[in-house]
């Protein structure tokens, strides 16, 4: 699979649980070697979508290919070439690190199993802890173990479901460095996350809400797609100002960012009229390029008002 | 990629190894597997009384006269005995006893009527299958007075003296297979089946629901494992556990309770494999229905209770009402009890137990098929 070719190319993926449509006709294309971020609020259908891709859930509708295999009919073949990291730590807590890796290697019929497991332990810096039970590991170490286990059969595609939930910032940074290194070796990633900084580390993004794909593309494409105009304001008692602004028509959102307040709307002219009464001392106003977070909050709010 | 559809021994071995490691780490469950047999063995020192009637009996009637028949009618009217077969020879009667098809063989000798009327006190031999003393006790106990009163109408007038104090008939009872009528001989081999039923069904039920409860099932399903690999991989380690339990019980039966071991222990081992498989398959099926470990335990008890009550372990099987017997026939424990008592106490061979064995195997097959059919390869 060369760079540029599609590793995931699915159309109309749909999953219903009774009355609820958890994933509603989602299309997604992910190119080889890409780090693709999958964002959306809790319960938006991210996990369900990943599970459909790796054959853990049967799709009710949809078609397409994952690594060249039919996403519906060839889930067995897909499983062999995909590494799936569950949202919740799902390795065996009463097995040691080494036993877990060895078990996974056996399940994938890995050749030179013992050597592969030893190398994997070495690469992750887990050599001294290999006999420790997985259940006794801290969040960061559990996450390392999970990633190592997902990689042991040398998959071509990794599906990571909120891999950094409950992991400290240093471990998160190390984790992302590792992801980028692996992507450079032509591994493809589809990662779900809640964190904006992580979303910005992805080469392309998709935003899903209530099972529907609302935006997709590079960070810039997603932001410009939302078509937001944002002003930043500094000054005293911003909380009170924010409250006033939210009541003003023409302002869609007023969100505190540290010492400043981001005020944004889809309609640039209306926004400028709305903030005009407040543009005086002691407030310092300036127009800024909209960030990813502004864009996502806008998407989320839109969805809420639409519902 | 067709390779992935084949059964992989590497994967099977992996699952078995993992199961053993987890078993070793789970001290409580491990202790339970050994503790339950020992605990139950020490607790069950008593038997429960009951009054079974309509016990199947065969008759060897060599007498041509009317008094032999009168005696049989009296036995039938007592409701303890149902004469279901007439046999020609003693060996034929003995075979029926050995296979458990009848509980008694009544042997009324040639010239019984003549000898009776002469006052020679003819001998009537009643052979009883006493493996379960509770089942035969009441019926045998009634025989003495039954025989005395049965012939009262025939022994009137000048014959009245024959109905004297010593009785007109010389009643001989042979309690076969358990001559001293020791209840432990019946209970202890039965416990083997009870203990295996309880632990085997529960342990497998837990082994699979635990994966689901801890979220590791999602991981296992995302790997290219086949249902048969997972299920067989889960069953094999517990077969070994089952044999350890059997060994413990057999040693206790022999040294603590002095239960006779008439038949082949190897045959018992082979038969036990089918029985263990039947229970493990049942556990697997439960685990595909149960949502968590607690439910798996509850289901085990739903299965265990009828097993212990309707199999003939607690109450004599033939003392139960018809519907209860039919339910009991479905349960694997019922058949295993007959086999284990047959082998240990009666010295049954393969031919004697084959009917029960087939019924066990059928149960195992049906349960495993349902288990594999219901085991889902997705999280749907």
Image: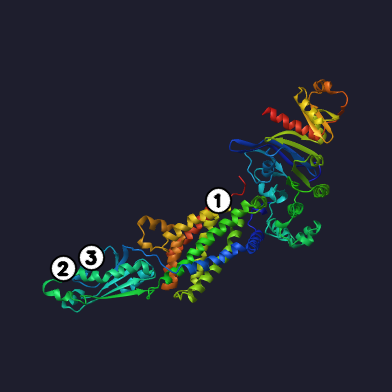
Query: Alpha-carbon distance for marks 1 and 2?
Result: 65 Å
Label 3 resides on the chain identified as B
The tag earlier along the polypeptide, 1 or 2, is 2
The image quarter containing residue B185 is bottom left
Number of dots carrying numbers: 3
Vertical comparison of B276 with A156: above or below:
below
Vertical comparison of B52 with B144: above or below:
above
Q: Which residue is mark 1?
A: B290
Q: Which residue is mark 2?
A: B153
Q: Which residue is mark 3?
A: B73
Label 1 resides on the chain identified as B
Please, which colouring scheme is shown? Answer: rainbow
Q: Is residue A118 visible?
A: no
- Residue B251 located left or right of residue A53: left
Name the residue rendered at 41%, 56% in the picture. B327
Percent of width and height locating residue A32: 79, 44
The tag earlier along the polypeptide, 2 or 3, is 3
- Residue A34 located left or right of residue B363: right
- Residue B122 located left or right of residue A137: left
Name the residue rendered at 84%, 21% in the picture. A276
Question: Considering the numbered disc 1 on the image, is that residue within a helix, a strand or a loop?
Answer: loop
The tag earlier along the polypeptide, 1 or 3, is 3
Quarter of the picture containing the C terminus of chain A is top right
Have a look at marks 2 and 3 and say if they share a chain: yes
């Amino acid at each position: 699979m060369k760079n540029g070719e599609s590793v995931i190319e699915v159309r109309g993926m749909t999953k219903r649980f009774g009355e609820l449509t958890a994933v509603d006709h989602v299309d997604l294309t992910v190119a080889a070697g890409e780090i693709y971020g999958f964002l959306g609020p809790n319960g938006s259908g991210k996990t369900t979508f990943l599970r459909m891709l790796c054959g853990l859930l049967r799709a009710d509708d949809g078609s397409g290919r994952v690594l060249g295999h039919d996403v519906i009919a060839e889930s067995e073949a897909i499983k062999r070439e995909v590494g799936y990291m569950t949202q919740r730590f799902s390795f065996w807590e009463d097995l040691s690190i080494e036993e877990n890796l060895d078990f996974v290697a056996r399940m994938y019929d890995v050749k030179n199993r013992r050597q592969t497991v030893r190398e994997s332990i070495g690469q992750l810096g887990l050599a001294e802890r290999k006999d420790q039970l997985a259940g006794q590991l801290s969040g960061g170490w559990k996450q390392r173990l999970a990633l190592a286990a997902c990689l042991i059969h040398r998959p071509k595609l990794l599906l990571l479901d909120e891999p950094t939930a409950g992991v400290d910032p240093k471990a998160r940074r190390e984790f992302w460095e590792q992801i980028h290194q692996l992507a450079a070796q032509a591994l493809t990633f589809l990662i779900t996350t809640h964190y904006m900084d992580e979303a910005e580390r992805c080469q392309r993004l998709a935003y899903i809400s209530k099972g529907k794909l609302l935006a997709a593309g590079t960070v810039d494409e997603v932001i410009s797609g939302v078509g937001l105009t944002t002003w930043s304001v500094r000054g005293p008692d911003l909380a009170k100002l924010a409250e006033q602004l939210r009541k003003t028509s023409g302002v869609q959102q007023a969100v505190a960012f540290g010492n400043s307040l981001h005020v944004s709307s889809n309609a640039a002219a209306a926004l400028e009229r709305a903030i005009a009464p407040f543009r005086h001392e002691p407030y310092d106003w300036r127009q800024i390029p909209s960030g990813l977070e502004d864009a996502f909050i806008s998407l989320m709010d839109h969805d809420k008002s639409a519902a | 990629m067709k390779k992935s559809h084949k059964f992989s021994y590497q994967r099977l071995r992996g699952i078995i190894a993992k199961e053993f490691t987890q078993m070793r780490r789970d001290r409580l469950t491990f202790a339970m597997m050994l503790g339950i047999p020992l605990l139950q063995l020490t607790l069950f020192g008593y038997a429960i009384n009951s009054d079974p009637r309509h016990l199947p009996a065969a008759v060897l009637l060599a007498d041509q006269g009317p008094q032999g028949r009168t005696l049989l009618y009296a036995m039938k009217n007592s409701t303890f005995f149902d004469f279901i077969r007439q046999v020609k020879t003693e060996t034929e009667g003995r075979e029926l006893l050995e296979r458990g098809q009848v509980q008694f063989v009544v042997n009324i000798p040639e010239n019984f009527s003549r000898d009776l009327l002469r006052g020679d006190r003819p001998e009537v031999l009643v052979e009883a299958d006493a493996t379960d003393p509770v089942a035969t006790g009441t019926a045998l106990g009634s025989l003495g007075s039954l025989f005395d009163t049965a012939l009262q109408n025939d022994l009137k007038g000048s014959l009245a003296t024959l109905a004297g104090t010593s009785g007109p008939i010389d009643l001989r009872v042979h309690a076969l297979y358990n001559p001293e009528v020791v209840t432990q001989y019946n209970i202890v081999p039965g416990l083997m089946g009870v203990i295996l039923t309880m632990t085997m069904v529960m342990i497998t039920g837990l082994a699979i629901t635990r994966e689901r409860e801890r979220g590791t099932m999602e991981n296992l399903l995302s790997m290219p494992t086949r249902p048969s690999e997972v299920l067989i991989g889960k069953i094999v380690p517990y077969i070994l556990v089952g044999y350890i339990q059997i060994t413990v019980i057999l040693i206790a039966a022999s040294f603590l309770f002095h239960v006779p071991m008439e038949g082949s222990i190897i045959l018992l081992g082979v038969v036990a494999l089918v029985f263990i498989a039947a229970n493990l398959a049942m556990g697997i099926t439960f685990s595909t229905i149960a949502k968590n470990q607690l439910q798996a335990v509850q289901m085990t008890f739903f299965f265990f209770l009828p097993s212990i009550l309707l199999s003939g372990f607690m109450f004599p099987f033939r003392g139960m009402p018809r519907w209860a017997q039919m339910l009991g026939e479905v349960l694997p424990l019922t058949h295993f009890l007959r086999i284990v008592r047959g082998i240990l106490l009666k010295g049954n061979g393969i031919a004697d137990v084959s009917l029960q064995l087939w019924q066990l195997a059928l149960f195992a097959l049906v349960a495993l098929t349902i288990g594999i059919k219901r085991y889902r390869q997705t999280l749907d």
